[in-house]
Amino acid sequence: MLSKSSTYAIRAVLFLSLNSDDEKKFNPKSIAEIIDIPAPFLAKTLQELTKRNIISSRKGRNGGFYLTNADKQNTMISIVAAIDGLEKFQGCSLGLPVCDSENPCPIHHLVAPLRNKLVEELTNKTIANFTKEIKDGHTHVF
Amino acid sequence: MLSKSSTYAIRAVLFLSLNSDDEKKFNPKSIAEIIDIPAPFLAKTLQELTKRNIISSRKGRNGGFYLTNADKQNTMISIVAAIDGLEKFQGCSLGLPVCDSENPCPIHHLVAPLRNKLVEELTNKTIANFTKEIKDGHTHVF
DNA sequence: AAGTAAAAAGATAATAATATCTTTTTATAT
DNA sequence: ATATAAAAAGATATTATTATCTTTTTACTT
């Protein structure tokens, strides 16, 4: 469903959303240790998110990755779109050239609603929304 | 969601279900040409399905792959299980060590019901069920 | 019985995803 | 100004997936 890279990205972003601000930044190595994912791989991922203006970074001494309040207004789907792209959520699930609700493949009516619901939810919810859920104790990332 | 191998397998099995019986068999090359997927890869896939008794084959002259009526009673999930395994439908979608409805990750309540529904439907429907849908003109595989 | 068509099995190759390491650039504290 | 800590960028390595090719075994047809 989601690639490993995307799940790493989501976990790291939510960690930063919970723990960082422009006064308190984190380098990829320490984030990787805390949330237990490969450090150099995470660095790549965070660089990509920075380039796409989903998270913030500051170079040099006392630098690191962090999230501003503005960053937290980005949608969850923007993270997945930056890392995996959204192509995997489009097109026929069986790989057929023609497949839509008029002319469905055998699993179209099964997969399309599920896939659409997932994309819709991730499109409607921001990083801030997810962060609040964690702070309220309804979900967790550890 | 499903690997390419699994989608190839499903398409090939449904083709055989529609067109073959123990009087009329198909070799992988001709199946591959008809449904437009790589032939040697398909051969591997069909061999695996044969080994797992999901489809039938006969070696030697006039041999080939085919589906018996008994074969058609196999579930759709058995095809996916044979090729991909079912691991990808289990465990936390974010890769967290602990994640269930009591202690959910941020996307657990979003992904788990969708995933369960997909597995459930593929578990409850047989190759014959899917084949009927195609014959009745409700779905297609080309 | 011999030849042959086809699955089965095994070996190899290409591509994409995941992971790691090294060098360069940048910003800031001193 | 200089040293330094950190992101950014680039190069390399590993693993899994997808794809192809070759050899062996099987069983039917003649």
Image (cartoon, coloured by chain):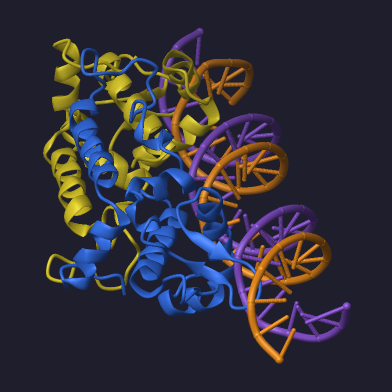
Chain colours: A yellow, B blue, C purple, D orange
* Residue drawn 33% across the image and 42% down it: A1
Quadrant of the image occupied by residue A129 = top left
Residue A53 in view, yes or no: no
State the image coordinates of residue A47 (x, y, percent, origin top left). Answer: 42, 37
Task: Decide which of A12, B124 is in the foreground and name it.
Answer: B124
Count of picture labels: 0
Rendered-image quadrant of the C terminus of chain B: bottom left
State the image coordinates of residue A137 (x, y, percent, origin top left). Answer: 17, 10
* Residue drawn 12% across the image and 70% down it: A102
* Residue drawn 50% across the image and 20% down it: A29
Task: Decide which of A72, B84 is in the foreground and name it.
Answer: B84
Q: Is residue B21 above or below residue C8?
A: below
Q: In the picture provided, is A21 more to the left or to the right than B91?
A: left
State the image coordinates of residue A131 (x, y, percent, origin top left). Answer: 19, 21
Q: Is residue A77 above or below residue C10?
A: above
Q: In the picture provided, is B105 more to the left or to the right than B4?
A: left
Task: Decide which of C8, B95 is in the foreground and name it.
Answer: C8
Quadrant of the image occupied by residue A59 = top left
State the image coordinates of residue A45 (x, y, percent, origin top left). Answer: 43, 36
Q: Is residue C11 above or below residue A81?
A: below
* Residue drawn 34% across the image and 28% down it: B94
Task: Decide which of A101, A14 is in the foreground and name it.
Answer: A101
Residue B24 in view, yes or no: yes
